[in-house]
Structures are given as structure tokens and as C-alpha cells.
Image (spheres, helix red, strand yellow):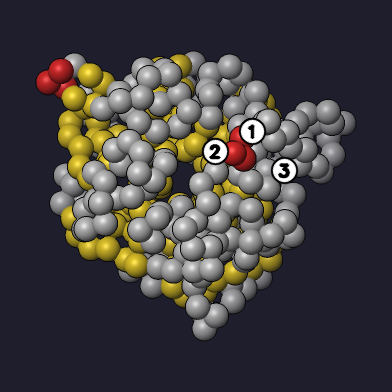
């Protein structure tokens, strides 16, 4: 029997990893128009008795199926476009899941901020590639053959198969930067480092690619998005009030979530705020942490909330 339910199991202590903003009052001004979207607070249908951990990220495959990366014992769950449960796998693979992307071949790329690894899985759940060493944090230095991440947050795959990883989850700890690999996982280059000047990061939390092939990196505690070409050349920065966590770029608009500020923003493709909705809270359209945003093939907006252990769906009215 299938019933409409979003039963979640928040793992003990998982909220303790959440990083609070230095100034939670910083929000997009009230002059921004309201985002005129209807909210579905429970878009998934789980089999009775099935539980899910706090959603960390979502992604869509070539069939339009929704994949949810969660922080429960079974990390990956697949759903039909209408929210009907299909299957789950990934038990025991990860420590603290964070980012999810699906490439053109429907392979799943998962970042594990707790185990310091990035894992590529086939659609059937077979591990195809692991970057980094599980349980070891450090630096990526080919000269010394030290190939370690320090809290990889998000990953994205370019049209040519190049893989980009952003790391550095905790402000002031580790080395926040972008690392670039080829399609086979060979390290190519990296850029960034700790700082507030252009090209540096405090927390490189999310990454997206626009239609021009430019990389948009959410530098959360610096309250900005930084835009680079795929060789690491700094193009521009976009400043925001709030804490940019994640951005999804569509054909006509982009959508950004503002973390603990509890906002979902609609942007134009130059990064200008067109509309906003949400606030901190536990109600419909509110967020504990608006952690990751994803667009469906029909540009419905999904927001994963790691603190409230919820997934909300936003559809234009």
C-alpha cells in the first residue's frame, strides 16, 4: 500500500553539524516581489513503514525521475515524476551526505562532507569511481601524491565530462576551493583558497553551470556568488543579503536558496533578484535550512531542508 507521507528519520546529532550564520537577520529586502508559487509540503509517496533521513540534495535523471540524497541509513531514493517511490540503495556507503548531481549517462555523483570523498555510482548503484580517501581530510597535491579532499560540498559535470568539486564546509577550517578533474577522475587544476577578495572563498558551498559554460559558485559566508570560466578565471561576483547555499540555473531563470536565512529566490540569468519567498520556521514555505535547490525538467522547484528534514515542491501558480 502506498500513501502520501514524508516520514523522515533525522539521525542523532546531524543538526549539530549545521553552521549558523554570523548575522541571521540579513535577508533580501522586503521590496523584492513575492514569489507567486504554490507549495507542496509533502511531494513524495513512500511505502508505509519506510523512513527517510534528512534530505541533503535532489536531482533529476534523463527519465524525469527524482532522486533524493538523504542522511538516513539508505542514502539514495528514486521516485517517479508524480512522487511515487521506485527504489532505494546506498546503505552504508556514506557518513554525511551533502551534494548530488546526475550526469548525461544517468550516473550519480555524491559528495560526502563527513568522509571527505566524492563517489560516482551507476544508475543501478554500483560504485564506478571514488575521489579522495574515505575518512581522511587533507590537501590535493599531485606533486606529493596526496590526493585528499577537505569537506567536499558539491559537484557538477560539464558537457565534456569534466568534473568540478567545491570543498570547504566549515568557515575558517580547511581550504575552500574548486577542484577540476577530467571525465576519468584525473586531477587537472584547482583555484580559490580562504579569503574575501575576488576568487577566494569562505565557504564554497554550491556550484552550477550556466548555458555559456560558466561556473557559478555560492560563497556562503561571504554572501555572494562568484562566477568563473572552466579554467578558473574570475569573471564577476554577485552580492546578496542572506547566505547563498545552492543555485539551480534554468532556461529562463535561476533559483537560489539562502540557507538559514530561510529564503527561496528567483533570479534572472544575470543574477538579479526578481522575487523571493520564505522565512525561518517549520511551516509550509518556511525553512530550517534551505540547503539545496533543484529544477525539474518542467522547472518545478524542489528545496531540500536538512534541519527541518523536509522536501518542499514549488510550482508557479
The reply, left or right, for residue 227 in relation to residue 144 is right
Residue hosting label 1: 13
Residue at image location 72% in from the left, 56% down from the top? 282
Residue hosting label 3: 44
Instruction: Report if the CB atoms under discs 1 and 2 are less than 8 Å apart.
Output: yes
Is 161 above or below relative to 256? Answer: above
Instruction: Report if the CB atoms under discs 3 and 1 are less than 8 Å apart.
Output: no
Per the model, the C-alpha gap separating discs 2 and 3 is 26 Å
Q: Secondary structure at mark 1?
A: loop
Residue hosting label 2: 17
Q: Which image quarter holds the C terminus?
A: bottom right
Residue in front for this viewpoint, 27 or 213: 27
Q: Quadrant of residue 175?
A: top left
Instruction: Report if the CB atoms under discs 2 and 3 are less than 8 Å apart.
Output: no
Residue in front for this viewpoint, 118 or 38: 118
Q: Which mark is residue 119?
A: none
Amino acid at each position: 500500500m502506498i500513501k502520501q507521507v514524508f516520514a523522515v528519520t533525522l539521525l542523532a546529532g546531524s543538526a549539530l553539524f549545521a553552521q549558523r550564520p554570523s548575522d541571521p537577520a540579513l535577508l533580501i529586502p522586503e521590496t523584492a516581489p513575492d514569489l507567486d508559487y504554490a507549495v507542496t509540503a509533502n511531494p513524495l509517496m513512500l511505502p508505509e513503514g519506510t523512513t527517510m533521513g534528512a534530505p541533503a540534495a535532489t536531482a533529476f535523471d534523463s527519465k524525469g525521475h527524482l532522486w533524493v540524497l538523504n542522511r538516513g541509513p539508505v542514502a539514495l531514493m528514486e521516485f517517479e515524476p508524480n512522487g511515487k517511490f521506485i527504489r532505494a540503495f546506498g546503505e552504508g556507503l556514506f557518513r554525511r551526505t551533502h551534494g548530488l548531481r546526475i550526469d548525461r549517462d544517468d550516473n550519480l555523483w555524491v559528495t560526502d562532507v563527513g568522509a571527505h570523498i566524492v563517489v560516482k555510482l551507476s544508475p543501478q548503484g554500483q560504485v564506478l569511481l571514488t575521489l579522495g580517501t574515505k575518512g581522511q581530510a587533507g590537501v590535493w597535491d599531485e606533486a606529493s601524491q596526496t590526493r585528499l579532499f577537505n569537506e567536499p560540498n558539491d559537484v557538477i559535470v560539464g558537457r565534456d565530462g569534466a568534473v568540478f568539486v567545491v570543498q570547504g564546509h566549515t568557515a575558517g577550517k580547511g581550504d575552500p576551493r574548486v577542484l577540476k578533474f577530467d571525465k576519468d577522475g584525473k586531477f587537472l587544476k584547482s583555484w580559490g583558497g580562504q579569503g574575501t577578495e575576488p576568487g577566494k572563498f569562505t565557504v564554497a558551498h554550491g556550484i552550477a553551470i550556466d548555458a555559456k559554460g560558466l561556473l557559478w559558485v555560492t560563497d556562503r559566508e561571504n554572501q555572494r556568488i562568484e562566477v568563473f570560466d572552466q579554467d578558473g578565471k574570475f569573471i564577476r561576483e554577485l552580492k546578496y543579503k542572506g547566505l547563498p547555499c545552492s543555485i539551480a540555473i534554468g532556461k529562463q531563470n535561476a533559483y537560489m536558496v539562502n540557507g538559514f536565512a530561510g529564503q527561496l529566490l528567483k533570479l534572472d540569468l544575470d543574477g538579479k533578484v526578481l522575487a523571493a519567498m520564505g522565512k525561518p520556521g517549520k511551516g509550509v514555505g518556511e525553512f530550517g535550512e534551505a540547503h539545496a535547490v533543484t529544477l525539474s525538467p518542467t522547472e518545478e522547484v524542489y528545496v531540500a531542508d536538512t534541519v527541518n528534514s523536509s522536501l518542499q515542491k514549488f510550482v508557479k501558480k
